[in-house]
Image (cartoon, grey):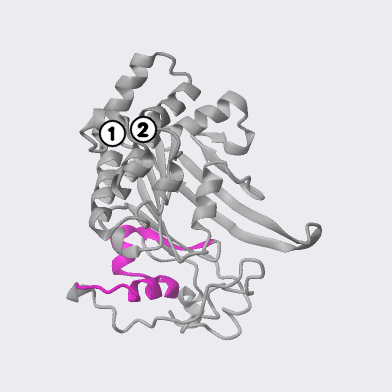
Amino acid sequence: MTAGSPLLQASNLHTWFELRQWGFLRVGSVRAVDGVNFALARGESVAFVGESGCGKSSLARTLLGLHRPTRGEVTFDGEELSTLKGKARQRYLARVGYVQQDPFGALPPFMDVRRLLNEPLIIHGVRDPAAREERIRRVLEEVRLTRVDEILSKFPHMLSGGQQQRIVIARALLLEPAMIIADEPVSMLDASVRVEILNLLRNIQRERELTLAFITHDLSTVRHFADRIFVMYAGRIVEQAPVDELLDHPQHPYTQSLLAAIADVDADNALEERDVPGGEPPSLLNPPPGCRFHPRCPKAIAGTCDVREPPRFAPREGHYSDCWLHDERHGS
């Protein structure tokens, strides 16, 4: 690997789920991830943003190897994920930590904290009990759970939601990963602890120089958190740019609608003139032709947006948007 090569790359990635009725009659395929391309640099923090059902979580599980791609590939540090078997796959799973949305559901209720943090270390070959104990205590302190002896003896139901999520983050860090995938990590938490957990993740990412893929439906959380944003809609990435560039100069009508839905208290960022479209995201079983956003888009061009899929345009330097409005033939 060269110094400038990406840590993780997705190329023409498709993850479809076959849908059957009565157990045998094929109805079609849910196109959860449908032609996604991106590359993540080492030490970079990125956010994948979009409404529920846009394919964010399916993408995360594909990157983790929990879903097998229908087409395309994912490469991590130069190795194609689908080719990894046995110990090679185990090494990959050790290098990519996972922070789930529901911390309580992610923690086995019958294990105390010491046991549930020991398990991944034992599975991945850390045989020395003293070495395991030292590593467990170190990561608990790293996630700001300083009463370590008290925490180690507790079961998940004895912890607050914020403490549970800190345990989930600690477990993701135990094996010294190169990358963390955090899937809506604060959506199940009280508002009072969300900022604490977000700041904790960002600080750990910077201190460890981790690559962080942060998945969220909430654009308001990402300005001080991510380096770049990928906006997803109906299984595809429709816009991508550095975080300040995208939030200050959104180019795709869908991104503009997401921002318009945020109650922005910054007068310099006033969004009153942006239209907020109604309706729901399309079915991923039978997505509409052309641009998938066109049935909801207030700027859709009849005879173009509803017929042809838009290519990727670069309306600003380093800023990419899949929208026909950027085609100079349409006067944009």
Looking at the rendered structure, the kind of residue marked 1 is Ile
Percent x, y of residue 106: 45, 44
- Judge whether residue 107 is colored magenta: no
**Nearest the eye: 22 or 75:** 22
Percent x, y of residue 32: 59, 59
Mark 1 neighbour density, 10 Å: few (under 14) some (14–19) many (20 or more): some
Looking at the rendered structure, the kind of residue marked 2 is Val
Total marks in image = 2
**At x 55% / y 80%, what residue is drawn?**
295
**Nearest the eye: 49 or 102:** 102
Residue identifier under label 1: 151
In which quadrant of the rendered view does residue 305 lie?
Answer: bottom right
Percent x, y of residue 135: 32, 23
Q: Evaluate if marks 1 and 2 touch, with contact meaning CB atoms under 8 Å apart.
A: yes
**At x 31% / y 43%, what residue is drawn?**
159
Residue identifier under label 2: 113
Q: Is residue 322 above or below residue 178?
A: below
Distance from disc 1 to disc 2, alpha carbons, whole Å, reads 7 Å
Does 221 sit left or right of 10 as displayed?
left
Q: Is residue 6 above or below residue 273?
A: above
**Nearest the eye: 146 or 272:** 146
Extreme right residue here? Answer: 24
**At x 36% / y 70%, what residue is drawn?**
250
Q: State which region is magenta.
A: 236-265
- Judge whether residue 249 is colored magenta: yes
Q: Is residue 197 above or below residue 128?
A: below
